[in-house]
Image: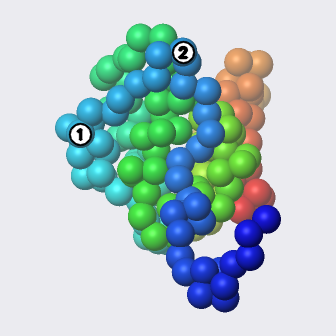
């Protein structure tokens, strides 16, 4: 092993610069077109409290759904394109969690858990609670027993779980 000088140890190198995830890109590889990257970058997420992260992700997925790259897995495309959507805290979060962001489902779930606004979650819980209360009141005023089908109960339970889990995790 060759000896290094102190200057060589302190000099910056590209080996320490973080890059995108190590995701299987299939046998042929692929290229993200510059116009596609520009479209994604037009709606960046910074990780600020006032941002509507779910709206940004919806826009991102709408762009993704407009194209397909033959023989390239969905996760590879999404995880290579996703960093172009991010700035600031959000981009730092992505690269700091690169080892765990190995599938789109894991990455998007963890991202929403980290950046989905607590205030929005609280507001949604309040709306669900008011909805449940109003349904019960209306039903009792009309002399009907409060009935809820198993399908409606399942949907309501899913919505409560979906909107509330982010505040628990984050």
Q: Position of residue 102 (x, y in %)?
A: 67, 38
- Give the secondary structure at mark 2: loop
Vertical position of residue 165 compared to residue 34: above or below: below
The foreground one among 104 and 20 is 20
Instruction: Answer yes or no: is residue 155 visible.
Output: yes
Q: Position of residue 5 (x, y in %)?
A: 66, 85
Near mark 2 (Cα within 10 A), the count class, few <14, some 14-19 or many ≥20, is few
- Give the secondary structure at mark 1: helix
Q: Which of the colour schemes (rainbow, by chain, secondary structure, one colour) is used? A: rainbow
Specify whether 79 is left or right of 113: left
Near mark 1 (Cα within 10 A), the count class, few <14, some 14-19 or many ≥20, is few
The foreground one among 58 and 1 is 1
Which dot marks residue 27?
2
Picture quadrant of residue 1: bottom right
Q: Residue at x 53, y 53 (%)?
A: 19
Specify whether 110 is left or right of 67: right
Q: Residue at x 65, y 61 (%)?
A: 96
Q: Which residue reaches farthest front?
A: 2
Specify whether 65 is left or right of 80: left
Specify whether 19 is left or right of 99: left
The foreground one among 6 and 103 is 6
Residue that label 1 marks = 34
Q: Which residue reaches farthest left?
A: 35
Spatial CA span between label 2 and label 1: 22 Å
Q: Earlier in the sequence, mark 2 or mark 1?
A: 2
């Amino acid at each position: 092993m060759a000896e290094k000088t102190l200057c060589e140890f302190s000099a910056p190198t590209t080996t320490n610069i973080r890059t995108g995830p190590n995701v299987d890109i299939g046998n042929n590889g692929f290229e993200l077109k510059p116009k596609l990257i520009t479209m994604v970058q037009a709606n960046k997420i910074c990780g600020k409290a006032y941002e509507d992260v779910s709206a940004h992700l919806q826009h991102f997925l709408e762009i993704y759904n407009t194209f397909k790259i033959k023989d390239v897995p969905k996760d590879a495309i999404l995880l290579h394109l996703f960093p172009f959507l991010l700035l600031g805290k959000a981009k730092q979060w992505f690269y700091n969690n690169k080892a765990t962001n190995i599938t789109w489902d894991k990455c998007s779930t963890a991202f929403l858990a980290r950046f989905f606004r607590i205030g929005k979650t609280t507001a949604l819980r309040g709306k669900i609670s008011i909805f449940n209360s109003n349904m019960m009141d209306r039903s009792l005023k009309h002399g009907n027993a409060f009935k809820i089908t198993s399908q409606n109960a399942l949907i309501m339970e899913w919505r409560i779980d979906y909107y509330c889990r982010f505040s628990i995790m984050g």
